[in-house]
Amino acid sequence: MNNKTICFIGLDGSGKSTSVDYAYDTLKNRGVKVKKVRAAYVIKVMSFFIKLGKKLVLKKDSNPYGGDYKSYLESMRKQSEKKGVYKIFTALTTFEFRCQIFFSITLNKLFGYTLLIDRYIYDNAVTYAANLGKDTAFLKETIEKKWKNAPKPDLIVYIKTPVETCLSRKDDIPDPLYLEIREPLYDEIANLYDAKIIRGDIEKDEMLSKVIDAIDSI
């Protein structure tokens, strides 16, 4: 296996990171030139401007983890309808994520690595759709237009785990609603892009075995 790109998607607490770590160790032991990449959106390059924009757009409801999550959603959706500052804010975050994709994924592919990506453009589309209350058409447009130049994976692995199980594994989820509105969106992504679905609530060894079988199939 050379220069393959495999991305793992799913809810927080579903078992993505566990799967990535196991796949990395397995492939490394086989002699594969492999690297783990966490491509979740993290503010780095445009940190000051994005944080300032978020404050201006959402004001007191700018942190989904720091207060009332329902108020955060309401504020985000209300501001998105006004355009203006929100449009500038989304342009900054898009530029930020494009930089991260280039340095974390595009360059590593050029260096010949097989990449195991923990979160990617699909998770980004799910987050936007969840925050703004959008549907399948929005998911598809975000991935196929906004991220059309992002390297496409050879395999998408969807670790599908019930919300209740994810909540039992994580203590930093701001509200059960955070996962509940994302679950059907991930289901749509899996359907649209032919993801390999592996249940994350089965025995751990069985889940990890299925992950390796999926990777070996490519």
Image (cartoon, grey):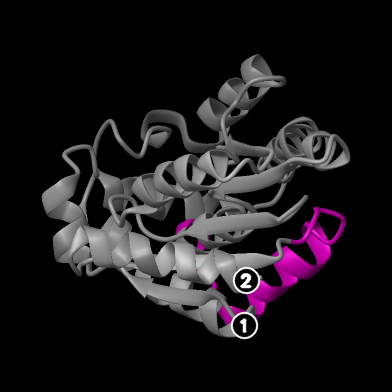
Find out whether the residues at labels 1 and 2 contact each other: C-beta distance under 8 Å: yes
Query: Residue 73 or 213: which is nearer the viewer?
Result: 213
- Snapshot quadrant of residue 195: bottom right
Q: Is residue 215 above or below residue 116?
A: below
Query: Residue 149 or 213: which is nearer the viewer?
Result: 213
- Indicate which disc residue 139 carries: 2
Residue 118 is inside the magenta segment: no
User: Where is residue 58 drawn, in percent x and y?
Assistant: 48, 37
Image: magenta residue range: 131-152
- Indicate which disc residue 7 carries: none
Q: Work out which quarter of the rendered image holds the N terminus and state it.
A: bottom right
Q: Which residue is rendered at x = 47% and y = 49% of the image?
A: 23
Is residue 51 at least partly visible in the picture? yes
Which residue position holds label 1? 192
Is residue 200 at least partly visible in the picture? no
Q: Which residue is rendered at x = 71% and y = 33% of the image?
A: 104
Label 1: how many residues lie within 10 Å, few (<14), some (14-19) or many (20+)?
few
